[in-house]
Image: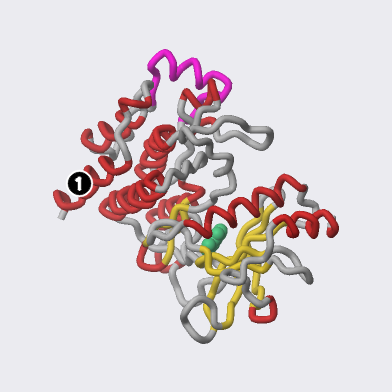
Amino acid sequence: NDSLIFNNIMKFSPDPKWEFPRSQLAIEQILGEGEFGRVLRAKALNISGPTGYTTVAVKTLKEDARESELNDLLSEYQLLKEVSHPNVIRLLGVCTEPGGPIYLIIEYCEYGSLRNHLRKSRRLQYESKKLINTEENDYDEPKTSDITPKDLISFAWQICNGMSYLSDIKLVHRDLAARNVLLAADKICKVSDFGLTRDVYEDNAYLKRSKGRVPVKWMAPESLADHIYTSKSDVWSFGILVWELITLGSTPYPGIVVQNLYHLLRQGYRMERPNNCSPALYNIMRKCWSLNPQQRPTFQELSKRFEKLLEDNI
Ligand code: ADE
């Protein structure tokens, strides 16, 4: 495994602009784990601007990761180098030099994933708030806070702005979902997890998928049927994400077996309007779920719609 990692690293010559000394990184704890990947919390000394210690998140591989996972991490690195927007997760540095595991150092988001945060806030409304949000709160748990209806619209608007930026630079996300958005201090949303974002073809659509779990309930019909991914299929996923926001992190299409979903969608079936969802907001979701990708709004148009909703709500 070591020699494999070494061989691959040699394909990418270390980039002095991003390389960060391992000796200035102190790993503190595991934030999350996937099948082959791991996200750690760490303190970094004098990283990108501020002097002193900054809390950061570190993406790395588990010991039993395969070559394809390494390639995913490295392609995520290549993509993250190119992006710069307040609503897109930012790369702070990288450790790729021999002598340890590969680390992608990214911004730390104190509230963790948006999906978990939404679900926690749901529990907060029922349990005694005092019990959870006290000083004795476990130090290592992500912060919790109340979420207002206006926050939900603000989250949708911020995610739109991040996605609008990504579509401008011709980057297709392919796995936009509440689990892949992080929430930072001051309730700032950051689109994250570019792991699947690779093989972008010239025509702005990309085909293929060799492995891994497929996020069926977030996928546009043309992605399910023909593996076509464009910013328009990201807009479909965004519509599902808005549904996740309104339902405070429910799983889409409750009770529907994923094997049946494609045919249901082709027949015109769509999720109904959640109880607490305004007709205006439901209308936006439904436009995102147009069978014809050309009939879906752009992220730029969506951003304007949410901006208006925010103004109306004041
Ligand atoms: N979990 C995954 N990525 C994270 C990040 N950047 N900050 C906090 N928790 C995370």
Note whether 117 is above or below 276 in the view shown.
Answer: below
| Colour approach in the figure | secondary structure
Kind of element beneath mark 1: helix
Residue at 32%, 50% (x, y): give it.
Answer: 152
* Residue occupying the far bottom of the picture: 52
In the image, the segment drawn in magenta is 253-270
Q: Residues within 10 Å of mark 1 (few under 14, many from 20)?
A: some
The answer to whether residue 29 is magenta is no
Quadrant that contains the N terminus: bottom right
Give the quarter the ligand 1 occupies. Answer: bottom right
Residue 254 falls within the magenta-colored stretch: yes
Percent x, y of residue 57:
57, 66
From the viewer's perspective, tell me whether residue 109 is left or right of residue 212: left
Q: Position of residue 139 (x, y in %)?
A: 55, 74
The x, y position of residue 270, in whole percent, is 38, 23
The answer to whether 224 is drawn above or below residue 150 in the figure is above
User: What residue did someone put label 1 on?
Assistant: 309
Residue ID at (64%, 36%): 213
Residue at 41% x, 48% y: name it. Answer: 169
Number of numbered discs overlaid on the protein picture: 1
Which residue type carries mark 1? Answer: Leu
The answer to which quarter of the image holds residue 233 is top left
Residue lying furthest top? 267
Residue 176 in sight here: no
Give the left or right position of residue 155, taking residue 250 as reference.
Answer: left
Residue nearest the observer in this picture, 115 or 52 = 52
Observer able to see residue 140 = yes
Q: Position of residue 243 (x, y in %)?
A: 38, 38
Q: Quadrant of the C terminus?
A: bottom left
